[in-house]
Image: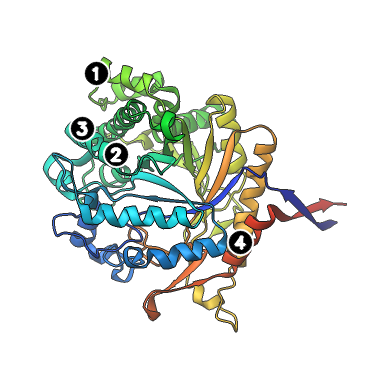
Amino acid sequence: MIKLSNKVIKVPDNFIIGAASSAWQTEGWSGKKDFQDSYLDLWYKNNKNVWHNGYGPAVATDFYNRYKEDIQMMKQIGLTHYRTSINWARFLVDYENAVVDEEYAAYYENVIDELLNNGIEPMICLEHYELPAVLFEKYGGWGSKHVVELFEKYAEKVFNRYGSRVKHWFTFNEPIVVQTRVHLDAIRWPFEQNTKKWMQWNYNKSLATAKVVKLFKQMQLKEKFGAKIGNIINPEVTYARSSAEHDQKAARIYDLFFNRVFLDPSIKGEFPPELFELMEKHDITFDYTEDELRLIKENTVDYVGLNLYFPHRVKARTAAWNEDTPFHPEYYYDKHELTGKKMNPYRGWEIYPQIMYDIALRMKEEYGNIEWFIAENGMGVENEHRFKNEDNIIQDDYRIEFISEHLQWLLKAVDEGSNCTGYMLWAFTDNVSPMNAFKNRYGLVEINLNENRNRSLKKSGYWYKELIKSRQLEVIEEEYK
């Protein structure tokens, strides 16, 4: 017999409960110069047909013009922290010499002021897929070490402008994603399968992080203003099909290529020796110098944000690899479909809240219990207007359940000593996602595309407000009698 009972979990007073988004997914193109396209803008212009219903970054949520309205909604919910990005492509008018676009810089100045004046701490990422398009076209993007140098120049200008008021800085959001979609899997424009180029992008972003961390230290932002700098990584918590060695090896190799490739240099200051061995075996070793490796070793991050949505399950590969194709890490593994798994049918992702606990223990046991937080977690659902009640409020109980279950596992790990300091929901409002556009909605706040993008709180927004206010998480537990 199963008996259900309510349980109340106390949220620690210093534990952040916030929300996130990015510049390109919210701002729109108002005020943008013709030459200030980012990689995402370029992709949208060249491959618009793959974006759901044609929506993309051109208008997005129009945050550029409506940030005051949105920040008032943040205040209404009670957010104390909001994570977003600065659009590198728009912040400068000359990328080689780091000449600032004063119009965009003033806009961002106003956003930061508005947040702080309403009691909300900005958490700012320097690159959330907003690589300037001209650098992608001219130099091959993050495959170029010259682009690494230009990123450092850009970061210095940003720190000079806002370093005295922003306490939370991050170099990248999900640094592995763009090159994985473009150069490894070739499923996004411009569709070039080149595994060695994929590894070079991975390496150069770690090098860029170390250079910017060093710059941060040299500018003494931490000492002067109490600021910190980190990286926002999206590790896929990886589970082997079985305890058998062949399946365990498959999981270890997946973890090497997709998780440790950024976790280890960011936190430990070095790439795993096993990764070098595999890169050399398959002739995909990135171009590096010993001085660069030393720089990475000496300039690790203060903390990390982790984006977690779903688990990744693998098994040993059984089918023969086509040797006529370039190497891909799938040479060593196949995806494993777990029988009976709980799914988000709209996004096609497994729902497994225990990933929070498992990654938390890993951060504690393998990464020196460094300070970290959940930088993204959320549930995307299609056609949410179906769930509106008579008051025209979306009844997104599924999102409330999703957040509750993940927070429950996360707070369990915090109680057991994992140095996790917060949870940032993706997302504050519905916003544009790559290709999916507004198809799957993630927000606490609805963006109504049929009514001039008007905003309104969903049921989850009111629930989140109460969670922040009460610092109490109510969960339902099953007891077996």
State the SS at label 4: helix
Tell which tag, 1 or 4, sits nearer the viewer: 4
- In the rendered structure, which amino acid carries the disc numbered 4? Lys
Give the alpha-carbon distance from disc 2 to disc 1, as whole Å. Answer: 30 Å
Residue drawn 18% across the image and 50% down it:
133
What label sits on residue 465 in the rendered view? Answer: 4
The residue labelled by disc 1 is: 289
Nearest to N terminus: mark 3 or mark 4: 3
What label sits on residue 160 in the rendered view? Answer: 2
Give the alpha-carbon distance from disc 2 to disc 3, as whole Å. Answer: 17 Å
Give the alpha-carbon distance from disc 3 to disc 1, as whole Å. Answer: 15 Å
Q: Residues within 10 Å of mark 3 (few under 14, many from 20)?
A: some
State whether residue 120 is above or below residue 224.
below
Query: Among all residues in the image, which is located at the extreme right?
Result: 481
Tell which tag, 3 or 1, sits nearer the viewer: 3
Residue drawn 72% across the image and 55% down it:
475
- Tag 3 and tag 1, C-beta contact below 8 Å: no
State the SS at label 1: loop
Q: Position of residue 134 (x, y in %)?
A: 14, 48
Residue 119 visible in image = yes
State the SS at label 3: helix
Give the alpha-carbon distance from disc 4 to disc 2, as whole Å. Answer: 34 Å
Q: Residues within 10 Å of mark 4 (few under 14, many from 20)?
A: many
State whether residue 340 is above or below residue 77.
above
- In the rendered structure, which amino acid carries the disc numbered 2? Asn
- Tag 4 and tag 2, C-beta contact below 8 Å: no
- In the rendered structure, which amino acid carries the disc numbered 3? Glu
Give the alpha-carbon distance from disc 3 to disc 4, as whole Å. Answer: 42 Å
